[in-house]
Image: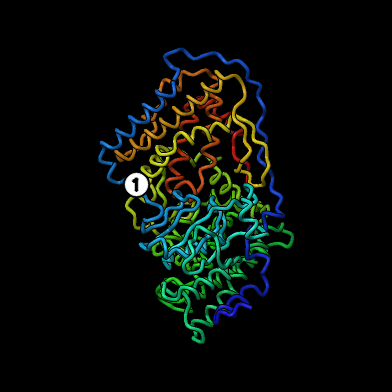
Amino acid sequence: MYGFGISSGLVHVYKLKYRCSISCDAYCMRTSVSALKKVRTRALSIVGRMDDSSTGSGSESKDKWRSLQNKVQNDPIKNIIPKIDFERDEDLHPAFTFDNAVRYFDAEETAVKVVLFRDPAYWCPYCQRVQVQLEHKRIPYRIRTINMRCYGPKPAYYTNLVRSGLLPAIMICPKGTSSEKLEGELITESLDIMIRLEEEFPDHNPLLPPKGTKLYEAALQLLKLERDVFGRWCQFMFRPEMFGNRAEDGFKQALIVWGDAIDKICPETPFLLGDKPSLIDIIAAPFFERYVASALYWKGIRVRAPGSEFEAVDRWLSAMEVHVQSFRATAADVYSHVHDIPPQYGTAFFSKSSEASFAQKFIDGWSSETWKIPISPLDEASLEPWPGHMRNEKDHGVHSKYYIEAASRMLRNHEKLTRFSLRGAGQLPKTVTAPLSDPDAQGPQGSETYRKSLETVVDQVIYDATSWLFDSASENTEKAGSMQLSDFALNAEECIRTDAARCIAYFRDRVGVPRDCSSPAARILRAYLNHACIQLVGVESWTKLEPELRVARA
């Protein structure tokens, strides 16, 4: 059926029992996810004008942002602001992805023969592992971004190519044909794609051992085991606890067996098949990343806790984070994962344990311990996983470079972010199943005066938060007491400030990793936006308003 030598054996083993799970979009077609709590409709017609001194015009807004840009350029921190070229940089930067971009790896345009079709939100684990393989092998490729059904429509050209609309897919273009033309061999289903890439590009950092070797046989067994862990995870997460702890015990045992395989197949090496990452590592790691997040949020289980029975799994994931830049770059944080998993796989079942209840509140920002300033460093005691690449950092996830990253993203995109945030004061009709996606959101209603006043205040708050981030990075210190909103925002009418808080909270809750920024930058940004919300309305009013604005439990 496949005719690629070793590929037929690998694919047969992998698909024997789990064919329906190969493409994640299959889940989106049959998933029913609880929609976000409806935002109450407010009939705002006439709102009192602000005094002339506090009314910001469009030119004034541009001037202040230009001034901030100049201030940053004259500050020593400018030296650590990354100059990113998505297409030509050595490293992958998901937040700078754009449709039809090309990853060249120093090659010429004529060398680009692969087109990758993947989701722009970086939710799909099947897409993730194909992209990590392309990056690790340094195969030049063009990227076309295609929505998952759970958060938006797919373009007609793609459904004409792939009638099912499933992701991922690749196209291998024949020699002499531009990858822009989308003419060539189309391959779907992630494992088929990955095996085909190994066959087509054997000289690009081969990731599979030779057929007939012991390591090849080990790879076959690991593929079986990886799907077994996946099946145990599905049973544990997406079925009610009807038979005691059987599902939990099965999931934990599968993780232990995976850890044993890490230690026994190639002892004293960081990866499954030796000193370097293999195709099996790349196939499995995106899913284990999700197992870690979901086990913590829904079940209160810390898979990556120090000294746990899953220590080998943590050590292996840490090695992937340290040594595989594209895996590190495409990895999400717990918050992003637990809100993108249900639209793809179905509603998970919460454990009744106190550990699960605490984890859910902590991750969603309901706890008094999260999204607060000063930001706590990540370490082995942190509830959230402590990524391997941060364990040798001086400041463990609160390094100034992460403040710069968050601030730079705000500075670069402030106009779009203001428009996006205004959805929080509008209507959010649910036309897709992803609870944090609102493709048909409607902006604020009411008079032109009200809408313009709200937009100006939201812009100012985003500006203030951006300034705080740059200041914290420049001064290498973080003091909540010195982070005050401008008088312009604080002197606005109460109804404007309240709706501005709604808008900023809407933005805060939809900061996604890695789509918008890295995990540590997202932690910092959510905390600063939360601080701005509290200042807009005051602690007492925010305490009453916040429960209404909380993101729905995943």
Considering the image in quadrants, where does the N terminus appear?
Answer: bottom right
Image quarter for residue 487?
Answer: top left
| Residue extending farthest bottom | 212
Residue 215 in percent (x, y) is at 49, 82
Quick check: 318 above or below 382?
below
Helix, strand or loop under label 1 = helix
Res. 327 visible in picture: yes
Residue identifier under label 1: 401
Image quarter for residue 412?
Answer: top left
Image quarter for residue 30?
Answer: bottom right
Horizontal placement of 142 versus 42: left or right?
left
What residue is at 60 percent from the left and 43 percent from the top? 436
Res. 319 visible in picture: no
Residue 529 in percent (x, y) is at 47, 35
Horizontal placement of 171 versus 399: left or right?
right
Type of amino acid under label 1: Lys
Quick check: 128 above or below 52?
below
Q: What is the crowding at mark 1: few (fewer than 14 residues within 10 Å), some, or many (at least 20)?
A: some
| Residue extending farthest right | 242
Residue 136 in percent (x, y) is at 43, 66
What residue is at 44 percent from the left and 71 percent from the top? 277
Horizontal placement of 87 versus 227: left or right?
left
Considering depth in this image, is 281 or 72 the residue closer to the camera?
Answer: 72
Residue 196 in percent (x, y) is at 54, 72
Horizontal placement of 101 versus 434: left or right?
left
Q: How is the image coloured?
A: rainbow
Quick check: 235 above or below 46?
below
What residue is at 37 percent from the left and 51 percent from the top? 85
Considering depth in this image, is 114 or 391 the residue closer to the camera?
Answer: 114
